[in-house]
Image (cartoon, grey):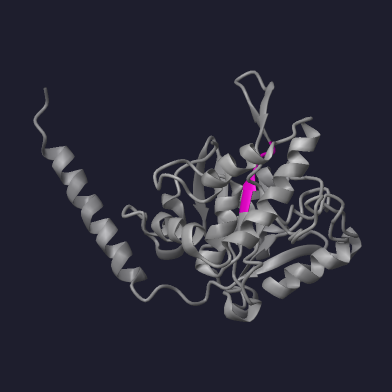
Amino acid sequence: MVGGSWLEEGNAMWGFHDRLLTLRKALHAFLSSSPRREALWRRWRRQQSLLNAQAGLVYTEVEWSDHSGDVSGGDIYESLEEIHVLALAHVLGRPIIVIADTVLKDMNGEALAPIPFGGIYLPLECSASECHRSPLLLAYDGGHFSALVAMETQAPVSLASAIPLTDSNHELLPIQFSVDPEDREDFGGKMELSYSESIALLKENLDVVRIEEQEGESRNGILGSIGKSVGQKLRLKLSRSNSQRQNNKGGLLCAVLHSEKSHEYLDKMLNNYLHTARIRFQQEQEKPLE
């Protein structure tokens, strides 16, 4: 399976690596025993069926059954797939946006394999009123996740930072596993959300705004460090079958990042990190030369 280190989710939320695998354990428990696991299985089977059809593959029921073990989490230390990101969004009760290339390339720039991680993952089986509306941001590159966080800013608190929900071609980032086929025999193969339905779904789970770009003004102003960090990747076309184009005359469609409330122990964690880093540096300096 494709995957990478998920220590970065803890880094993005709390400011430190989740070295005790707290999130992975919660994810494993959710996929193993949660009453929502059947709905996530249906959503995964529908999306996987569409991808299989594009590749000319057809799974037998035995193969679907075998794959269900992978979706359920399997070994807690195994690498993870897109469905696990969706499950994590439910565990956290929080949307997750993954910025990623669409194709893995070799050192010569030749395409090797598709990268399916990019897109928007919403806790679709949870009540939006009970979930956090500020998305968790991750970049996926080279088989690893990296946390994306907004730096402190003097911008108005109501809109300190934001993340684009479209690519440079003004196409919506894929809303992963957006359709539950329920008991349909074709697994909802022809079910797709319209553009207006996609926007409504995003607005239900995120605080969506349209940012007008003034003449001579850089978009990085309101996007802050997020815009600078992922600008290059957003210029890549993160499109799938459910990507849809917006009218760019309405401004840049973004989700607001609510970063005004930091973790109550943030300062202590930063000071502890700097203190231990200083000790390690001094120890390196005191080592005798060989």
54, above or below 203, in the image = above
Looking at the rendering, which quadrant does residue 197 occupy?
bottom right
Outermost left residue: 288
Looking at the rendering, which quadrant does residue 201 occupy?
bottom right
What segment carries the magenta color? 98-102
The magenta stretch spans residue 173: no
Locate residue 216, reporting x and y percent. 79, 59
Q: Residue at x 42, y 54 (%)?
A: 24
132, above or below 290, in the image = below
If the image is split into quadrants, where does the C terminus sit? Answer: top left
Locate residue 171, reporting x and y percent. 82, 52
Looking at the rendering, which quadrant does residue 85 occupy?
bottom right
Locate residue 78, reporting x and y percent. 44, 41
Relative to residue 218, is residue 251 drawn left or right?
Answer: right
Q: In front: 264, or 276?
A: 264
Relative to residue 243, is residue 72 drawn left or right?
Answer: left
Q: In front: 100, or 216?
A: 100
Magenta region's main secondary structure? strand
